[in-house]
Amino acid sequence: MGKAAGGVVFDQVSKHYGEVKAVDAVSFTVSPGELVTLLGPSGCGKTTILRMVAGLEPVTSGHIAIGGTDVTLRAANERNVSMVFQSYALFPHMTVLENVCYGPLSTSSDKAAARKLAHAKLDMLGLAGLGDRLPSELSGGQQQRVAVARSLVLEPAVLLFDEPLSNLDAKLRRHVRQEIRDLQQSLSLTVIYVTHDQEEALAVSDHIIVMENGRIAQQGTPHELYEKPASRFLADFIGDANLVEGELVVDGEGRAFAAGGATMPVVADGMAPGPATLAVRPHRLRLVEPGPGSLPGVCKRSAYIGSRTEYMVATPWGDLLVFDAEAHKPRGRDEAVGVAFDRAAAIVLPR
């Protein structure tokens, strides 16, 4: 990149709309060359944070630094950031090349240099030869890459993505998100990426910040958030999880979880016995023959989706979703089964 990549520091930043606290005293750091995703349900504050980084929303309180410089009071055009919008925001009457040149030409009169830079970014993104087309003549994935090229041509310190894949179909989303990740890593771009799609966040991120009601619910690597959610909200929001309300008890071998008259051993080091919520991922459960060491269950329904069979099983702990990737022996409706899991596979959360 032509300009040094810069990190972003949010220090106790809040944004209020009247009495509504859209963002409430949020602090985080994005290191140079890192892709950090803001993840959360609609209305949690993630897009407001992105707009404050871009300078499109003033902060109510707190400070924002980019590349070590306090930009809290700086205008959007003084921040050396560029945003890729959800709608792409391409000019429909301009060609691809004109769209990509627009930013450099608005700050410089050197048309030849701007066109050369634009061609270089289009080539980098696999769009060589498409410069004379209109956006309407491109596929959704190509339009997305044009929007990225238009941002990269400004050579920003920080690149911002606001729900960039929401207009694409599922298969194309998977392809384009990998393109964005490959580009970010190959150019060591500093990126803040907003999405409500958990799988997308897990796939592209170095670090994920999960927002809930204007605050940070938890932040960490994709692995940390998936394997060690800090709350029921996190366990339920990131990936599929069976959530069971019950009690953490002490048995002869250590900790166990009890609910509905059935008890299974779990790992809950340092957690006091008492009311608890157990979260266990469907792919961590196994269907076995009924017997000791498993929960008694009855198959209520099944769905074969190619890579696995998904079962809903009635147990003393309620209905549990089970993903069976082996699928060697399909289970029938109303068939008696056992549901087993490894002690360490369950996440025990205080309630």
Image (tube, rainbow, N blue to C red):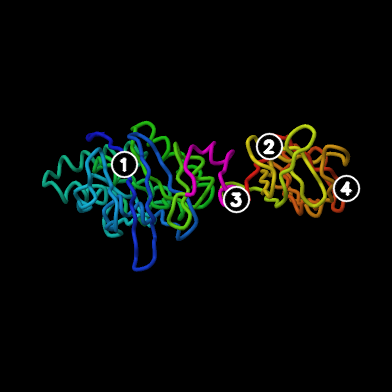
Quarter residue 341 falls in: top right
Q: Nearer the viewer, mark 3 or mark 4?
A: 3
Q: CA distance from mark 3 to mark 1?
A: 29 Å
Q: CA distance from mark 1 to mark 4?
A: 55 Å
Q: Nearer the viewer, mark 3 or mark 1?
A: 3
Q: Nearer the viewer, mark 4 or mark 2?
A: 2
Amino acid type at circle 3 is: Arg
Quarter residue 152 falls in: top left
Q: Residue lying farthest left?
A: 109
Q: CA distance from mark 2 to mark 3?
A: 16 Å
Q: Earlier in the sequence, mark 1 or mark 4?
A: 1
Q: Residue at x 27, y 48 (%)?
A: 63
Q: Which residue is mark 1?
A: 8
Amino acid type at circle 4 is: Ala
Secondary structure beneath dot 1 equals strand
Drawn side of residue 223 relative to residue 275, left or right? left
| Residue 52, percent from left and from top | 31, 53
Q: Which residue is mark 2?
A: 345
Q: Which residue is mark 4?
A: 336
Drawn side of residue 235 relative to residue 59, left or right? right
Specify the quadrant that holds the N terminus: top left
Q: Residue at x 32, y 40 (%)?
A: 128
Magenta stretch in the rendered image? 217-236
| Residue 106, percent from left and from top | 16, 51
